Amino acid sequence: MVIEKRPGLPAVWFLTMHSKTVRVEFYGVVRLRTNREHFDTTPGTLAEVLRAVQCAFPTLAPDYIREGRPAPHLLVSLDGGPATDDPTLPLVAGATVVLVSAQSGG
Amino acid sequence: MAGGLFGKYLLVQLTGEAVHAEHVELDPRVARQFIGGVGLGAYLLWQHAPVGVLPLAPQAPLIFCLSPLLGTGLTTTAKFTVVCKSPLTNRISDSLSSSRFALGCKKLGVDAIVIVGQLARWSHLHLHQDPRQCRVRACPNWIGLSAQEVSQAVAGERASKKVHVAAIGVAGEQLVRYATISNDGRHAGRGGSGAVMGSKRLKAITIEGQAKATVADPRAVAALARGYAQKSQGVATEKYRLLGTAANLSAFARMRILPVRNFQAVKVEPKQVKRLTPEGLARHAGHVRESCAGCTIACDHRYGGTRMEYETQFALGPLCGVFEPDKLLAAARACDTLGLDTISTGGTLAFAMECCERGLLDWPLRFGDDLAAWITCIAKREGPGAAMAEGSRALAHSLGGDAPRFACHVKGLELPGYEPRAMQTTALGLAVAARGADHNRSGAYQADLSPGVDRLRADLERGPQRVVDTEDHAAMLDSLILCKFLRGVLEHPYAEAAAMLRVTTGSDFDGLEVRAAAARTVTLRHLFNQREGWTRVEDRLPDRFYDEPLPQGGVIDRATLEQMVTRYYHLRGYTDAGQVTPARCRELGLDWVVGSNLCADFADREK
């Protein structure tokens, strides 16, 4: 697995693997609403991937995903890294996106 | 008097086998400046704690503070604050607890209860709306009982089952420095207020009263209460309602911010974590959901009858290398019954486990062990438990050598479940918090988990301001007192808080004034510590976090964190050394601190 960082976009990570899909992992309430632990979809920007998730799991809209963007109560992270909401973020095959309820703590 | 308040507090003095109680007027400006809760608590602690008092000395006050919103029907407001000088940190401590005891306290017709002195024998203090009817009664038969058992005993003695009881467990009797005060199955957890109550030989406090605070605009209060009750059923609280904070465990593990084995790692196998998640625990032990009195969120998730929250789950689970549901639940149950703070218990045990692993201690204690028996030893101060009852800082000092380097505390308070090397705003928040390593008075983790924040890298420019903002936000919620789980519901927190105060008190609060009150409270807490001997050296993390990078590469740069601390002080208006000047006190409306002349150094600085 090769990981490289794109200059100027500190939150962007490219993962190049043999997989041809992007994996979206669900945690917490997002998992409850989808009743799934993960979902595989085709590569694209973060907005495109979230739209695909929203299409497959309409129960996430509008509370967690709104027109391909994370709603305020959703935390999106690439492979468990820092949170991002950049809709243009490119996600290549092999990337993993983590979706978690944003309200943490306790 | 402003609505929601009574304008007085109950001063309770204990001596020998007697109690003397009286009402003391509160200057109306105090309510305006500090609102209630932790703010009022900081004010009363400053007034009643003699300078340099030992936390377990008879003169050290134990303070219960209420708020103007308590009893109004606004959701999540059935709360109170316990404030004292912490026997674990020797600094200020304020803990929140909830439910019926809070509502009972309000019926005493006061805004706070200040208890000083010490009794000759273990006793039950009965507080009455009429101070002349306050009583103490020896209760030798209650020694060794849990708080819940004491509540049952009190209820058994009375015709009415509606008895409001706060009590300590065995840990409080034994003055364990992180003992809790328990009421209605909940705890004022952090900082060791249970030991302070134990030092006064108070096993239990009961409440009797019928007073009712008026509110300025009952219809408006009722409308707000309906509105927030409805909003509290929305997506902002969904996690708390459906899963509770225990849902954090698997998410935090995935984000590599879940501390494991005394902060030696953040990597844990998903299969191990899965067994401890809400779903895993429910499958294993069954699940019921409960709520505090007057709360519409109901975040209290119990598995096999045992409450489980993220901090308990982290501290008694992965932090101690425990991944078996039965062991975790048994440990949580033991802390609950014995009256111990779960974070400090887990933190101290995890530290001792690492010491054993390194050969610094010869106790038969290893990561992954069954904790319940060890927890009992701590609460009863039996064998090695006596050393652990002092907390990880004291244990590390007694061992000397390398041990303090990996004792994971700040100011003596054990760290909560956020890995600071992978959460660099949190690192600063933990370092500077007045209470010690603290995720409740500084919600800096919220900043680290926000889009656009690279939590792996220290942000010297924006990080300190984020810490100031989250501290003020927390101080506002804790002064009103609103549950933090309501925070996602408040779109404009200070303006909405001001609106709640306006309709309750009748005073013309606005958002800016509420924010100023929060900042004043944060500074007064810091001033208390300063008065008690705090220096900048205390605002730092254990060496482990600077010297041992995480396998994934996260580490804290000592010089950068120091710079961030300095920047934080400047934003707060402190000096480079973190000292609050008399001029800054005046700016914040804390003139009386300057005039009180309680600290010689402080007076000198003004010359």
Image (cartoon, coloured by chain):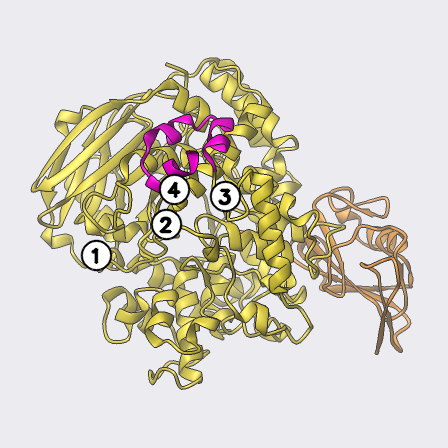
Kindly report the distance in space between the C-alpha atoms of the residues bearing marks 2 and 4. Answer: 9 Å
The dot on residue B430 is none
Tag 4 and tag 1 share a subunit? yes
Kindly report the distance in space between the C-alpha atoms of the residues bearing marks 2 and 1. Answer: 28 Å
The dot on residue B533 is 2
Q: Secondary structure at mark 4?
A: helix
The answer to whether residue A96 is magenta is no
Q: Is residue B551 left or right of residue B305?
A: right
Residue type highlighted by circle 3: Ala
Kindly report the distance in space between the C-alpha atoms of the residues bearing marks 4 and 1. Answer: 27 Å
Q: Secondary structure at mark 2?
A: loop
Q: Which residue is mark 1?
A: B173
In the rendered image of the structure, the colour used to display chain B is yellow
Magenta highlight: main SS: helix
Task: State whether residue B464 is above or below residue B75.
Answer: below
For the residues labelled 2 and 3, say whether their Cβ atoms are less than 8 Å apart: no
Q: Quadrant of the C terminus of chain B?
A: top left
In the rendered image of the structure, the colour used to display chain A is orange
**Residue at position x 86%, y 57% from top?**
A9
Q: Earlier in the sequence, mark 2 or mark 3?
A: 3
Q: Secondary structure at mark 3?
A: loop
Task: State whether residue A30 is above or below residue B500.
Answer: below
Q: Which residue is mark 4?
A: B528
Mark 1 chain: B
Asked which quadrant contains residue B396, the reply is: bottom left
Task: State whether residue B24 is above or below residue B152.
Answer: above
Kindly report the distance in space between the C-alpha atoms of the residues bearing marks 1 and 3. Answer: 31 Å
Residue type highlighted by circle 2: Gly
Residue type highlighted by circle 1: Glu
Crowd rating for badge 1 (residues with CA inside 10 Å; few <14, some 14–19, many 20+): many
Residue type highlighted by circle 4: Phe
Q: Secondary structure at mark 1?
A: helix
